[in-house]
Structures are given as structure tokens and as C-alpha cells.
Image: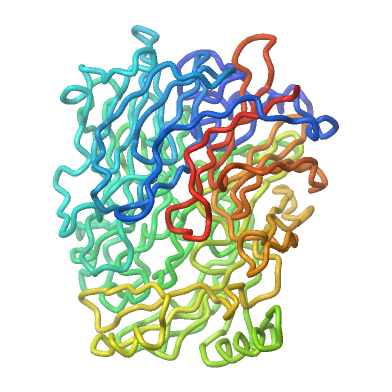
Amino acid sequence: MQPGIMNSFLILALASNISTPFVPEDWPVYGGDPGGMRHSPLSDITPQNAGRLKVAWTYRTGDIASGRGPRTSFQATPLLIDGTLYVVTGMNRILALDPETGVERWRFNPGIRRSDSYGDGLTCRGLAAWRDPAGNKVRLYVATQDGRLIAVDSSTGKPVAAFGTNGEASLTAGVVQKHKGEYHFTSPPAVVRDTVVVGSAINDNNRIDMPSGVVRAFDARTGAVRWVWDPIPRRGDDPAFATWENESALRTGAANAWSILSADHERDLIFVPTSSPSPDFFGGARLGDNRYANSVVALKGSTGEVVWHFQAVHHDLWDYDVASQPVLLPLRKNGGLVPIVAQATKMGHLFLLDRETGKPVFPVIERPVPQSDVAGERTSPTQPFPTVPPPLAPARVRPEDAWGLTFWDKKNCRELIASARSEGIFTPPSLKGSILVPGNIGGSNWGSLSYDPERGLAILNQTRLPFYVRLYPRDQLGKARRENPDSEFGPMLGTPYIMVRRPLLSPLKLPCVAPPWGVLQAVDLATGEVKWTVPLGTVRELAPLPLPFRWGTPNLGGPLTTASGVTFIGATADSTFRAFDTATGKELWSTRLPASGMATPMTYRARKGGKQYVVIAAGGHAKFDTIKQGDYVVAFALP
């Protein structure tokens, strides 16, 4: 590979959505670049000196909620633009900080009501930014929990009066909510050219007719709606309509894009990862493949027209949303560079797709999968499996695979597995109970992957935590509650069933499968070869005793790679931030955080000749009761 070709492609791939020459020291987009590679060309911090990293500064946002009402999740990745660091909190407050000291410059408060209820707690993962070519001013955009798209002047923290009405555009116009807060926003908007595109988050498993998961696009200057696209085809002349039998597309909701979108400015494309239709675990009222749901869909950025789609799961019954950001990267193939989309999934599958057509770069095979025995359900007979790379996560749990700290613990796990359907990946929910593996939080989740173009490696963090799911007839709610204490219940109104779900845990509250329960992996995308796999996290905060065993933990958040060959990641339940050698997987450095860093880190150099900083939000997670919450922004640098 000629270095000049690679460097030219890297600059193109990382080109910011802010219309100025590329500045490698900045981090102007949630994923580092519009395609979400999460890679920095900075190289001050190396495998040789990473062990010397120290805390440079710590900032507390003041936004933390626990007890009554929704809890906060601080999952944000900051932006660094023109010498200022911008952070957003779970309450959608935007903070401007000095990137070398952490001193606050200004803050914007959109006035989110803490008392309102939201399905994901108070969560906001990031901001979008756009530079107006006319005045060279940068606007920041945040999609708020209560359904507003707000544009803020990056230099003052004041709403941009010319955008919408006093700086705000509505994200709920035409949306029917039966319960306030069931339709909300957790991820950053995406900007393609001069258009701001926003998905939505919708509560799971409540009923069939949840709100529509429409994707909206707004004029970046005025806030006027440019187009609206519904992931569920509502018109009979759409070829996808026939994949929703009995016109069920007219009665179903969700299939929304709650995760992070990607943009290709050169091709005027926006890449949308969609979720499962409502409800997740029974699809008898939406028979068929349910096209556009559980897919990555390429839309024309200027019009919202569907250019192509690839469905990762047919007729989802497992909550296998496409949760990871579609990552746009250059694949080394046949002596050249091919622009592709790398789509990681909860199933541990990694699909590599041609960016212009959506066709798999390597063969994808439709394989037979277990079939449902639930009255009224009809499972898809096959599901798509990638051949390169092969599936990256374990896909079956048998009674003999049961694991426990004690004989009694292991015996209980073995009996639970033996009592349920456990026929490998895509085992459908059942009335006797089913084991779902890898489980509905991963494989890969919203943290997505990082791609190191110098080494051709994709770095993925994955969770290996099977779940137990059982359906009960609706009139057996009392029995379901008695038999399943400490479980999550989904009413699935409009269906004959209710859903019970919980992680597959032993009486000692550890997973019923052998560790590691969280891993970090490196995959050579040109060959599909897994270069290394290492446990990610210790169980010191999960086990009955604070044991620092390197068994890995369930993880949420993503990795960051740098040109020098260092991978940074938080994500784990053990409140630790780590650095790894990208080439070998060797752990180079770790430090304890004041709370779990379930966010994706970023890196920057604030000024010419200045230090390289690495920053992570440390705030825990609203749905992990055992994990400490916080409101910390922590920056690290070499002394």
C-alpha cells in the first residue's frame, strides 16, 4: 500500500462536517469524523509512554439524579472545535470548557424537567456541529429529551434566533404519544452538508402501536423541515410494504433509529441504523420480514429517498436492534481501497457492505434458524450470517456449559438452562422460556467499533451475557410475577402475551456462563481474521466479594484508536479507564475513574505545540443499579 494513497484516503475519510480544511487536532463530530471511525491521527501518546498518563483536569457538570424519578446516564462524547471543548449532559445542558484546564466558559440550559419520565433515563450521548460558510460561525445542535432540536451559537451559548422559533424546531410534530416521555432522544443528530438529521428513541415492549420511528431532516440554517422518512413503509406502492403481511405496517410502531447516524458528504448519503418494530418479543401482529426494521438504510441526504438497505435481522423477536453506528471506512481489497460501511450488531455479526450499493463485500449466507412454537407467531425460516469476518461471539448455551462460583450456583444455572429452549442464536421466545445468546445488550451495542486505517484493524468491545426470556398468556400476569421476581416485564399490549426478561444469572448474581463476560477484539477487515481477543474489565464491583478477577464485564461505550497504535476504552462496570496496544491487545495502562466510564472517549490537541489530551465522561448508567453514578469529565495527558 502506498503511504500517499492511504494518507489521502484517511484525510478524505476523516474530513469534518464543518466546512473548513481538516484540522487533525480537533474532534468536531461525535465519532471523530462524519463516518464514525473513532480514530485520531494524533500520535504523542504511544505504546511506549502510555503508562505515564496522569489526570490533567476534572470537571463536574452538576447533572446527576438518583432516587425518585428518572436517573441520569452520562454517556456523552465531547466535541473539540476551534479551541473549545463542548460537553452535553443527560439533562441536555451544553457546557463549553477550556480544553487545557477544564474551566467553564459558558453553559446553556434547555430547561428539561427532571420529573418527567423517559424510557432510557436522562441520557444524551452527544452533539452535532455545523459551520455556516456565510459567516464562518459554528452552530451546535442538541436533540432534547422532550422533543426539541435546539441550535446554539458555539461562541456564546445562546440559541440561534434564526433557527426555527427562537432557536428551536419541534421533533414531536405529528407524533402520537399515549404516555409522555415514551418518545424521546438520546443520540446526537447527524449533519450531511447543510442538513441536520435526527432519529428518535422509543420505549420497548409496551404495545403494538407505539409512536412512529420517523427520521427527520432540517435545514441547518432555518430549522425548516426538509424531509421525513418512516422506517416502517406506510404506502402500498412501496415495495417494502408487502413484507409486512396483512397491512400490519399501518398498525405497527417503532423500528426507530435511536443510535448514531453516519454521513458521507461527498455522496450526499446519510446512514441510518434501525431498531425492531413494536413490540420486540412477539411479532404475530406484524408477520413477514418487516423490511427496513433492524437494518442499515442509506438515504439521500438532500431528499430522504431510500438509496439502499441491508437487513441484519428478519422479523426480529429478540430486541436485536441495529444499535451500533454504521462506520464508514476504507477497506483494503485487491490492491486498492474500497469505501464500505462496517455494521457491527448485537448478535456478534460484523457486516461489511459496499457504501454505494449496500451489497456485502464478502458473502452473506441465509442459514436456517430455530422456529417458534408460540401460537400466532411465524419465525423467519432463515437469518443472514456473514462469512468474513465469521460471527465474533458465542452463539449457544447448553446445560453442560453452566458455570458458577460454587457447586450450588452451577447446579441452579444448569437447571435453568435445561428448563428452557436453548437452540443457539435466534432461538425464539417461548412459553417455557428461552435462552437468548449473545443477548439483547450485545455483542456490540451503541459504542460501535473503532477503525485504525494504518493497521487495517477494527477494534470492537463486546458483551457476552445471555438473557432468559419467557412469554406468558396475558391472564397469567400474577403467576409470571411470582415465578420471576427481579425481572423486567413487558406488557406488549395488543398481543396475547406478556414478556418476562432478565440476564441469565446465578443465585450469586454472576452470569451462568463461563467468563469472559466482556471482551475487546481486533479484526483484520481485509481477511476477517481475529487478531486478538482479551477480557475487558474485572468483576470487583459485580461479584459478591470485591475480587479483581479479569473475567470481563458487560460493557456499554466504545473504543478510540490513535495513529500511534494505542486503543483507549472505558465502557466497563468496574469504573476503570484502559489503554491497549492496538497491534497486540496488551494492556498498557489503566486507572480508576470516579464513576464508571460508560461512554466513548475522544482525544485532541487544543493548540499548536500543545499536549495531546484524552477525555472521557464518567457517569455510570441509569439502568445499572449496582454501578456508581457520577457527573465527571476527566482529561488525561502525559506529564
Specify how the rendered protein is coloured: rainbow
Percent across and percent down for residue 311 are 45, 60
As drawn, 466 above or below 546: below
Q: How many marks?
A: 0
- Horizontal side of 227 relative to 528 (left or right) equals left
Is residue 357 among what the camera can see?
A: no
**Residue at left 36%, top 23%?**
107
Percent across and percent down for residue 483 are 40, 88
**Residue at left 50%, top 22%?**
85
As drawn, 279 above or below 176: below
As drawn, 418 above or below 60: below
**Residue at left 51%, top 74%?**
467
- Horizontal side of 580 relative to 542 (left or right) equals right
561 vs 634, nearest the viewer? 634
Percent across and percent down for residue 322 are 46, 56
Res 341 → quadrant: top right
Quadrant containing the C terminus in the rendered view: top right
Is residue 352 among what the camera can see?
A: yes
**Residue at left 53%, top 92%?**
419
